[in-house]
Amino acid sequence: MITPNNLKLITDKDLIVFLVAKGFNIQKIKKDKNRNRSLVYFKAANELETAILSFVNKTETINICEYQAAERRVKTLLCLQKNN
């Protein structure tokens, strides 16, 4: 889903971690109280769509250390969001 201000909504944690590890910046995060989840927004761009397809099709590899570091940062962010 792309919002009017050109942000793409992503809720899948694994995909979020992959994108952060690839160097994409989280633009906005909101809590969805109705479904008890976090709504994470990235800037919509062709590169983002390509990265999403690479994730789904498993056509790209990333450094495991970068992935683990991104996973820790995203987990911290989501925990902070959950507690608010």
Image (cartoon, helix red, strand yellow):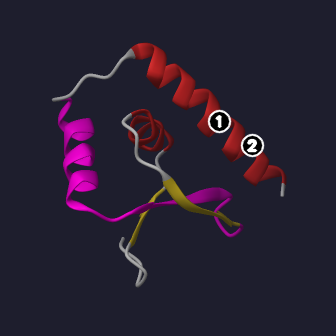
Instruction: Please tell me how many numbered marks the rendered image carries.
Output: 2
Residue 47: give its label: none
| Quadrant assignment for the N terminus | bottom left
Compared across the picture, whether 37 is left or right of 13 comes to: right
What residue is at 28 percent from the left and 53 percent from the top? 48
Q: Secondary structure at mark 1?
A: helix
Query: Horizontal and vertical percent for residue 43?
Result: 39, 63
Label 1: few (<14), some or many (≥20) within 10 Å?
some
Query: Horizontal and vertical percent for residue 46?
Result: 20, 59
What residue is at 51 percent from the left and 54 percent from the top? 26
Compared across the picture, whether 15 is left or right of 74 comes to: left
Residue 49 on the magenta span: yes
What residue is at 41 percent from the left and 78 percent from the top? 3
What residue is at 74 percent from the left and 43 percent from the top? 79
Residue bearing the label numbered 1:
75
Decide: is 75 above or below 48. above
Q: Secondary structure at mark 2?
A: helix
Residue 79: give its label: 2
Query: Horizontal and vertical percent for residue 22?
Result: 36, 36
Residue range highlighted in magenta: 33-58
Three-letter code for the amino acid on which mark 2 is drawn: Cys
